[in-house]
Amino acid sequence: MGIFKFLGKTSQKILTSQMYAQNRNKKIGGKTVDKWDSCEKKIGILGTLQGELSDYNSCVGIYKAYYKGEVVYIGRAIELNNGGFRKRLTDYIRKSDSARGTNSSSKMNKYKDEIKIGIIIVGNNDEAIQITKQLEKMLIGKYKPEWNVEFNR
């Protein structure tokens, strides 16, 4: 890795971490980041979830991928009228690789039978989508997950 790429990657991590540190007590959608984080619901192993996600078709929010006990990826499900969490999470496990154009997506698929998923349901309206976008950045700053694209540029 060249020095400029390394510095860019490092500065992105620092900025995201600083954003979390400076705003961790700021309310997003009426809750702090840590309060949202405490609402996480563990839903199971990614590779076995396909039939169990229909309850989350119209929900938007954050999902966290745990591999070997560590948060390795934080993503958002914001397709309100197109399957919510079900759509986003099944993209990683379906046979077609059309949704796996990034390194993190490929890893999610490769380790799908070892990755545990937790979700934070933010809501089911346009306001929830905006809250989810802000919350994702803050949680990435909090956890610094290894597979997130922001840290792999």
Image (cartoon, helix red, strand yellow):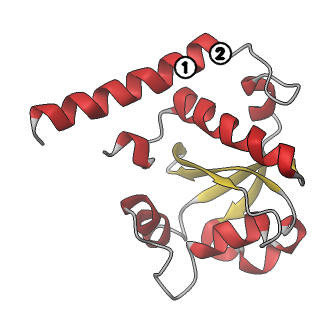
Q: Amino acid at mark 2?
A: Asn
Q: CA distance from mark 2 to mark 1?
A: 6 Å
Residue farthest toward the bottom in the current orientation of the protein = 95
Mark 2 and mark 1 in contact? Answer it, CB < 8 Å.
yes
Q: Amino acid at mark 1?
A: Met
Assign a secondary structure to mark 1: helix
Residue 116: x %, y % from top left: 62, 57
**Residue 78 sits above or below residue 109 on the image:** above
**Residue 84 visible in image:** yes
**Residue at the image point whose x is 73% and y is 13% from the top:** 25
Residue 118: x %, y % from top left: 71, 51
Which one is nearer the viewer's eye here, 50 or 57? 57
Quadrant in the picture for residue 115: bottom right
**Residue at the image point whose x is 26% and y is 31% from the top:** 8
Q: Is residue 67 left or right of residue 150?
A: right
Within 10 Å of the Cα at label 2, are there few (<14), some (14-19), or many (20+) other Cα atoms? some
Q: Is residue 89 left or right of residue 110?
A: right
**Residue 128 sits above or below residue 4 on the image:** below
Give me the disc on residue 19.
1
**Residue at the image point whose x is 71% and y is 72% from the top:** 87
Which one is nearer the viewer's eye here, 40 or 84? 84
Assign a secondary structure to mark 2: helix
Residue farthest toward the front in the current orientation of the protein = 126
The residue that disc 2 covers is 23
**Residue at the image point whose x is 75% and y is 15% from the top:** 26
